[in-house]
Image: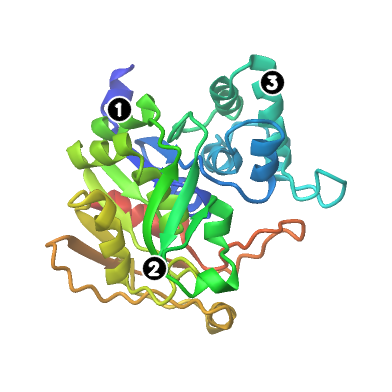
């Protein structure tokens, strides 16, 4: 490792999905050593095919991180291909080229971990991307009526009967060990960032793995929780900022030093779309009984984000602005 690399601040982003993509997109513009630790529990959309038919760990969150961290020097056409989602075809409609590409590499090299690394090399990414675990497992949520639901997709988009109940416990089934490289990156970090992303299926899905829980509790890094902008129907319905923080602390205890909270409003048109689906903006009020530092800021991207017509999964329309978020996070270093 060069002296230049050693002198860089080491930032670890823990999560998955769009939130991690946004955070990495902004942070890669700064002279820092970036690592993304990515959830491996996704079971919806094309990931169901990747898991059930290819016998691999889900790759969609890995793919998004690769695109976020891809060097501007990498091939533009290849980057476009990597995010292309098929709109037609039996068995491949809704799939992304990137997911199929990494599945093919896993077959060629006989190792999904090697396939991920080869893809990262191909895109000359500015950082490292680590699956939180290299073992196959699923999320299991227990609700306040005693019901247990297994599978990230079913937790992320629950049935109407389950959506009215609150999650009281989250675990993985079966229990698995963490990726040792992910654990070490947390212990070596200067800053560890939780989120943004769906609280239970993107953030806590990583933190409930025992070795990761211990690592975030032990690390000397500044641990920053990026508060979500909107509630998630069926996961965090009617949650306040305080409810989000309480839920996080339920699983990792005191392993959160700062909370970054948005204090601006999205455009009214997009907000109405959320409200029609029983989702609301997360209020910025925190009672803060834990003496956690609260940092407020305008973090919203006012652009309305539309999803691909071939994408069957629900996506966030209101997102953090990559540059606003990164600038605030870097200031906390």
Going from the N terminus, do you reach mark 2 or mark 1 first?
2
Q: Is residue 119 left or right of residue 240?
A: right
Instruction: Residue under label 3, please give it.
Output: 107
- Number of the label disc, if any, that sits on residue 112: none
Disc 2, disc 1: CB below 8 Å?
no
* Residue 331 visible, this orientation: no
* In this view, the mark in front (3 or 1): 3
**Which of the 4 image quarters holds residue 174?**
top left
**Depth check, front residue: 133 or 69:** 133
**Residue 197 image point, x, y percent:** 45, 56
**Residue 130 image point, x, y percent:** 45, 32
Residue at x-position 47% and y-position 48%? 139
Going from the N terminus, do you reach mark 3 or mark 1 first?
3
Helix, strand or loop at disc 1?
helix
Residue at x-position 60% and y-position 62%? 315
The Cα atoms of the two marked residues, 2 and 3, are separated by: 42 Å
Residue that lies at the very extreme toward the right in this rendered image: 89
**Residue 102 image point, x, y percent:** 66, 30
Instruction: Residue under label 1, please give it.
Output: 184
**Depth check, front residue: 55 or 23:** 55
- Number of the label disc, if any, that sits on residue 144: 2
* Residue 228 visible, this orientation: yes
């Amino acid at each position: 490792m060069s002296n230049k690399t050693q002198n860089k601040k080491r930032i670890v982003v823990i999560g998955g999905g769009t939130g991690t993509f946004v955070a990495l997109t902004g942070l890669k513009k700064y002279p820092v050593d970036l690592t993304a630790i990515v959830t491996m529990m996704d079971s919806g959309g094309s990931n169901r095919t990747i898991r059930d038919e290819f016998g691999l760990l889900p790759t969609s969150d890995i793919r998004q991180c690769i695109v976020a961290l891809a060097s501007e020097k990498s091939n533009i056409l290849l980057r476009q291909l990597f995010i292309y989602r098929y709109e037609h075809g039996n068995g491949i409609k809704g799939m992304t080229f990137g997911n199929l590409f990494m599945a093919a590499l896993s077959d060629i090299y006989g190792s999904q971990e090697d396939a991920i690394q080869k893809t990262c090399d191909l895109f000359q990414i500015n950082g490292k991307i680590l699956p939180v675990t290299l073992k196959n497992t699923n999320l299991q949520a227990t609700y306040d009526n005693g019901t247990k639901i297994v599978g990230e997709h079913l937790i992320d988009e629950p049935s109407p009967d389950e959506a009215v109940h609150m999650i009281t416990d989250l675990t993985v089934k079966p229990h698995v060990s963490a990726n040792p490289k992910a654990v070490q990156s947390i212990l070596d970090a200067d800053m560890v960032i939780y989120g943004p992303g769906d609280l239970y299926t993107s953030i806590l899905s990583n933190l409930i793995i025992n070795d990761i829980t211990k690592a975030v509790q032990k690390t000397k890094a500044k641990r920053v929780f990026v508060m979500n902008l909107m509630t998630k129907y069926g996961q965090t319905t009617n949650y306040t900022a305080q409810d989000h923080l309480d839920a996080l602390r339920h699983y990792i205890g005191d392993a959160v030093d700062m909370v970054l909270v948005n204090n601006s409003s999205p455009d009214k048109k997009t907000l109405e779309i959320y409200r029609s689906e029983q989702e609301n903006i997360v209020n910025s009020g925190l009672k803060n009984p834990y003496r956690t530092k609260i940092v407020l800021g305008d973090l919203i991207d006012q652009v309305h984000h539309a999803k691909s017509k071939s994408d069957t999964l629900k996506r966030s329309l209101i997102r953090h602005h990559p540059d606003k978020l990164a600038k605030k996070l870097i200031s906390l270093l």
